[in-house]
Every structure is written in structure tokens, then in C-alpha cells.
Image (tube, helix red, strand yellow):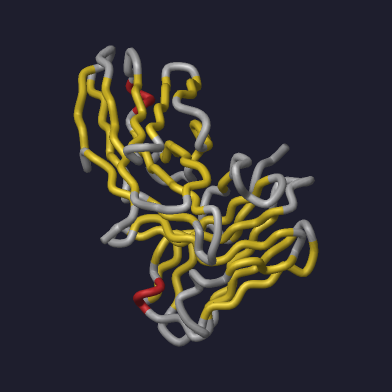
Amino acid sequence: DAGVIQSPRHEVTEMGQEVTLRCKPISGHNSLFWYRQTMMRGLELLIYFNNNVPIDDSGMPEDRFSAKMPNASFSTLKIQPSEPRDSAVYFCASSLGGGSPHDQYFGPGTRLTVT
Amino acid sequence: KNQVEQSPQSLIILEGKNCTLQCNYTVSPFSNLRWYKQDTGRGPVSLTIMTFSENTKSNGRYTATLDADTKQSSLHITASQLSDSASYICVVSRQTGANNLFFGTGTRLTVIP
């Protein structure tokens, strides 16, 4: 298995632009998680889906962030409009079941820089 | 105050030595505790998951312990290798409520030859 696939690996954009991050979970996994990691705040859970349905989006910072999972093999995290404070590494992870206590498998991350 | 505190923030040890990383938490009601290893520039990789009834779990040279009464966990690394250099993150899950994952800020371990 190729593992969790994320694209792009790096994204540099100007403030105010729309950014879309993509994730393909491991085949057969039915839970998907979006995380953000910064030096200051560490790892933070933004949202997670179970069977393509958003279960908990309380970690999404504000309305500029939105996430979708149209099918079991694809999810997007969109930031519109982007701001410099959104600069971070965004990880996608997938797991079997409801996410606890099954192992979560992380993708390589997307490093986002907003100038 | 963060509900998951890790110590030390950073640690340097000689190759071949053992070390222990600490994780204290206040998360309640407790569901499970995970230790992750994160290499620089990569995503975290799960090392162990422990539920309330488990007080020790091993994964190769990594052994995690859990004391649910004192709300403390430790990760012991035996006979360290250069490849153990990474950040180690403790994550505690709560049984109920929204946003039920709580993250430590990690311990940065450097193993030197």
C-alpha cells in the first residue's frame, strides 16, 4: 500500500489567495483526520470524518477553513482567503474504525507558506 | 494550561544509552494514550496505544507505561540508536465531547555517536 497520499507537498501562496490541500487515505480505512502543526502550537486536530461524514470540526480555526470528503478515497482542506498565520504543515491521517483506539497513519504533510 | 504536559522538552543522549520520556495529563474521562515518533520533515508514526486497563506495552526497543491513577505515562527507549533521533509526541483521547484529542508539545530526542 502506498500509505496516505497528500498533495501538494509544498505550497507557497500570497495572502488572500485560496489554497486547497488534498488527501487520499489508505484504502479500506473509514476514518480521516486533518491536523495542523506549527512550532508554537504543536500538533492540532482540525476535523475528522468517519465514513465520509464530518464527526468533529471543533478544531477548525474559523470560517475561512472548510473540509470535504466527497468519497472514501478523497478529501480536501480549503483555506479561503489564506492569511500568513495559516503557515504550517498540514497532515492528513487515516485509520480503521472510529479513530480510537486504532492506529492512525499519517501522510507526509503539506508545508504551506502564506506570504 | 495544556492538558498534556511532556518532559523534558529536549534531550541529548549517547548512542547505546537508555532514556525515559514523561507525559502527564489531566484529560478526563480518559479513553486512551498514544505515543508517536516524528522524524524531521515527516508525519508522526504510531509507536503504542494504551487503554485504561493496560499499564505497559512494548514495540521493539520502545516500552510505554501508563498509570491511570496518577495520570502519568512514560516512554522508555532501550539501547538507543542514531535513528531514534526524533520528536516524541504524547496524545491523550477523551471518551466524550467534541475535540477529544489532546496533544503534548513533544520531546525532541537527539542521539549522538
Evaluate whether residue B87 shows in this view.
no
* Residue at x-position 65% and y-position 68%: A76
Q: To which quarter of the image does residue B76 belong? A: top left
Viewer-closest of A72 and B4: B4
Viewer-closest of B90 and A109: B90
Q: Is residue A43 left or right of residue A60?
A: left
> Residue furthest toward the front?
B69
Where residue A15 appears, x then y in whole percent? 41, 83
Q: Total of numbered circles in the picture?
A: 0
Q: To which quarter of the image does residue A53 belong? A: bottom right
Q: Is residue A86 left or right of residue B19?
A: right
Q: Is residue A92 above or below residue B99?
A: above
* Residue at x-position 53% and y-position 66%: B98
Query: Split into 4 quadrants, where in the image is the C terminus of chain A?
Result: bottom left
Where residue A103 appears, x then y in whole percent? 60, 40
Query: Split into 4 quadrants, where in the image is the N terminus of chain A?
Result: top right
Q: Is residue B38 above or below residue A15?
A: above
Evaluate whether residue A74 shows in this view.
yes
Where residue A59 appears, x then y in whole percent? 49, 69
Q: Is residue A110 left or right of residue B84?
A: right
Q: To which quarter of the image does residue A86 belong? A: bottom left
* Residue at x-position 50% and y-position 64%: B99
* Residue at x-position 47% and y-position 39%: B34
Q: Is residue B43 above or below residue A42?
A: above
Where residue B40 appears, x then y in whole percent? 38, 42
